[in-house]
Image (cartoon, rainbow, N blue to C red):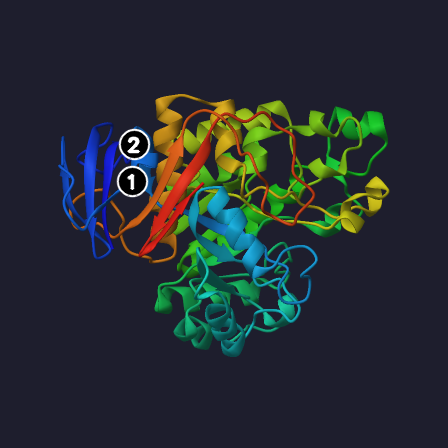
C-alpha cells in the first residue's frame, strides 16, 4: 500500500506535528514522510477525499458488546465491524458476555479467527470468572496466551473479594488488566434509574450513588493490598470520582473509564419513560456529569468507553421496568462528545482517552503520528453528524451531534465514509 494524505490536520497531543496541516506519505503500513507538500509520486494513491480533514491515531474502544454468539439478533461480528468503522474506531475490545461465555482459550481463539478478515481489529476480553458467575477464577493465563487483551465480568458482580484478589495477583505477573464494574446490586435489586427527582416523580425504583461508592471503596482497598492492574469501569458519580482521584495519589496500576453516555446525558432524559436512555450505570444528575467532565480533563479518568450495548426491539420496546439496560453508542460517541464540548482541550483529551490510553491499558504498543508510525488512523470532521446507522441495535439515544468520522486506515485497509 502506497498512499499520500494531502493537507490533513494532525490531531495528536503526543505528535511533534500536533495542530499542523501536513501531507502524510504511507508505504507498507508505516508513515515514511510528513511534510508541507509532497508531490504526487507514481505508484502512490492520493486520497483527495481526506484533504483538509483531521487525522489522529486510530480510535480504540475498550468496551463493546457483540451478540455473537448467542444473541445475533442484537449484533453480529459483521454489523459491529460496520458500526465501529462508521463511528471512527479501528480497534474494538469485545466483552465476554455472550452465550456461551468467552471464558476459555478456545473461545478467545474462535473470536480471533471469526473476525480476522473484518475492517476492524477485534480485541478479545476474557471473563474473570467461569460463566461470569463470580465464583471460580477463569483460566486467565491460557486466555492471555490465546490473545485476550484483558479480563472483565462485564456488569456482573464479583461478590467474592478473594476472587478479585487472586485475579489482581495474576494481573501483576501477566501484565494484564482486571476490569471491575462497581455496582452493588443488592443495595437496590429492583433499581431502574438514578436516585433523584426523576425517580421520585415517576415512581421508579432508584439506583443510589451509594451502590457505586461501596464497590469502588472495596475494590481500591483490595488493589491497595494486592497491587496489580485494576481498571474501574463506568464511573458515574462525583463521589466515585473523588475516591479514585485520592487513591491514584498512592496506588500504581489503577486506572478508570467513563461510559460516553454519562458524559452526555442526565437523569432528565428519563422524564418521559424512554427506555432508550435506561443504562447501567444510570444516567446521573447534572452535578455528577460536571464532576465526570472535570475528572476527564484533569486525568483522574483515563479512558472514554462507548459501552456499546445494542438491543433488539423486544428488549427495549416494552414496559419500562422490563426493558433491558443499555444503549447502542459506538457510531455516535464522538459526535455527541463534540456537541457537548467543542473546545480544543476536549478534542485533545478525546485523542488521549480513545487512542493512547486504551493502547497502554491493553499493551497494544504506541501509535503516534510521526515518521515510523504504523498505519492505524482515524480521519474525522469536527462538524456534521453520522448519516447512516450500521449497528443492528435500535436503542440509539437522540442527543445532539456535531462531528463524525469520514474514514479509517488500518494496515492495508482503507474505509471512506
What label does residue 208 carry, if any?
none
Q: Which residue is rendered at x = 13% and y = 37% of the image?
A: 39
**Position of the C terminus by quadrant:** top left
Q: Residue furthest front?
A: 42
In this view, the residue in front, 194 or 163, is: 194
* Residues at marks 2 and 1, CA–CA distance in whole angstroms: 7 Å
Q: Rate crowding at label 2 as few (under 14), some (14 to 19) or many (20 or more) other CA atoms within 10 Å.
A: some
Q: Secondary structure at mark 1?
A: loop
Q: Rate crowding at label 1 as few (under 14), some (14 to 19) or many (20 or more) other CA atoms within 10 Å.
A: few
In this view, the residue in front, 64 or 72, is: 72
**Position of the N terminus by quadrant:** bottom left
The location of residue 342, given as percent across then percent down, is 43, 22
Left or right: 116 in relation to 65? left
> Mark 2 near mark 1, Cβ–Cβ under 8 Å?
yes
The location of residue 72, given as percent across then percent down, is 67, 61
The location of residue 334, given as percent across then percent down, is 48, 34
Left or right: 243 in relation to 284? left
- Height in image: 203 above or below 130? above
Q: Secondary structure at mark 2?
A: loop
The location of residue 260, given as percent across then percent down, is 54, 37
What is the number of callouts on the image? 2
What label does residue 51 carry, if any?
2
In this view, the residue in front, 410 or 308, is: 410
Asked whether residue 207 is in view, the answer is no
Read off the residue under disc 1.
47
Left or right: 88 in relation to 72? left
In this view, the residue in front, 52 or 140, is: 52
Asked whether residue 139 is in view, the answer is yes
Q: Which residue is rendered at x = 31% and y = 36% of the image?
A: 55
Amino acid at each position: 500500500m502506497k498512499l499520500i494524505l494531502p493537507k490533513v490536520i494532525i490531531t495528536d497531543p503526543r505528535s511533534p506535528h500536533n495542530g499542523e496541516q501536513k501531507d502524510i506519505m504511507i508505504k507498507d503500513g508505516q508513515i515514511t514522510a510528513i511534510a508541507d507538500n509532497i508531490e504526487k509520486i507514481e505508484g502512490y494513491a492520493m486520497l483527495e477525499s481526506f484533504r483538509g480533514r483531521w487525522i489522529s491515531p486510530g480510535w480504540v474502544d475498550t468496551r463493546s458488546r457483540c451478540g455473537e454468539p448467542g444473541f445475533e439478533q442484537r449484533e453480529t461480528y459483521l454489523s459491529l465491524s460496520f458500526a465501529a468503522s462508521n463511528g471512527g474506531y479501528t480497534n474494538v475490545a469485545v466483552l465476554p458476555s455472550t452465550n456461551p461465555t468467552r471464558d476459555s482459550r478456545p473461545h478467545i481463539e474462535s473470536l480471533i479467527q471469526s473476525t480476522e478478515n473484518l475492517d476492524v481489529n477485534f480485541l478479545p476480553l476474557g471473563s474473570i470468572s467461569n460463566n461470569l458467575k463470580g465464583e471460580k477464577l477463569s483460566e486467565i493465563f491460557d486466555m492471555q496466551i490465546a490473545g485476550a487483551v484483558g479480563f472483565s465480568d462485564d456488569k456482573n458482580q464479583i461478590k467474592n473479594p478473594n476472587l478479585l484478589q487472586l485475579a489482581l495477583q495474576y494481573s501483576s505477573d501477566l501484565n494484564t488488566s482486571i476490569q471491575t464494574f462497581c455496582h452493588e446490586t443488592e443495595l437496590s435489586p429492583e433499581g431502574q434509574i438514578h436516585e433523584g427527582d426523576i425517580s421520585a416523580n415517576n415512581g421508579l425504583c432508584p439506583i443510589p450513588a451509594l451502590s457505586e461508592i461501596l464497590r469502588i471503596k472495596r475494590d481500591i482497598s483490595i488493589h491497595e493490598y494486592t497491587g496489580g492492574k485494576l481498571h474501574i469501569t463506568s464511573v458515574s458519580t462525583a463521589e466515585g470520582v473523588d475516591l479514585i482521584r485520592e487513591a491514584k495519589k498512592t496506588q500504581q496500576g489503577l486506572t478508570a473509564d467513563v461510559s460516553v453516555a454519562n458524559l452526555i446525558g442526565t437523569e432528565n432524559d428519563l422524564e418521559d419513560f424512554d427506555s432508550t436512555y435506561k443504562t447501567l450505570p444510570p444516567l446521573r444528575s447534572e452535578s455528577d456529569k460536571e464532576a465526570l467532565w472535570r475528572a476527564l480533563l484533569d486525568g483522574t479518568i483515563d479512558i472514554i468507553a462507548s459501552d456499546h450495548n445494542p438491543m433488539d426491539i423486544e428488549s427495549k420496546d416494552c414496559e419500562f421496568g422490563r426493558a433491558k439496560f443499555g444503549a447502542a453508542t459506538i457510531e455516535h460517541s464522538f459526535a455527541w462528545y463534540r456537541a457537548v464540548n467543542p473546545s480544543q482541550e476536549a478534542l485533545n483529551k478525546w485523542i488521549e482517552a480513545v487512542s493512547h490510553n486504551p493502547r497502554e491499558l491493553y499493551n497494544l504498543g504506541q501509535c503516534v503520528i510521526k515518521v515510523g508510525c504504523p498505519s492505524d488512523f482515524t480521519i474525522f470532521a469536527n462538524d456534521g453528524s453520522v448519516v447512516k446507522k450500521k449497528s443492528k441495535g435500535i436503542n440509539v439515544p437522540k442527543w445532539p451531534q456535531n462531528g463524525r468520522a469520514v474514514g479509517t486506515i488500518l494496515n492495508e485497509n482503507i474505509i471512506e465514509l
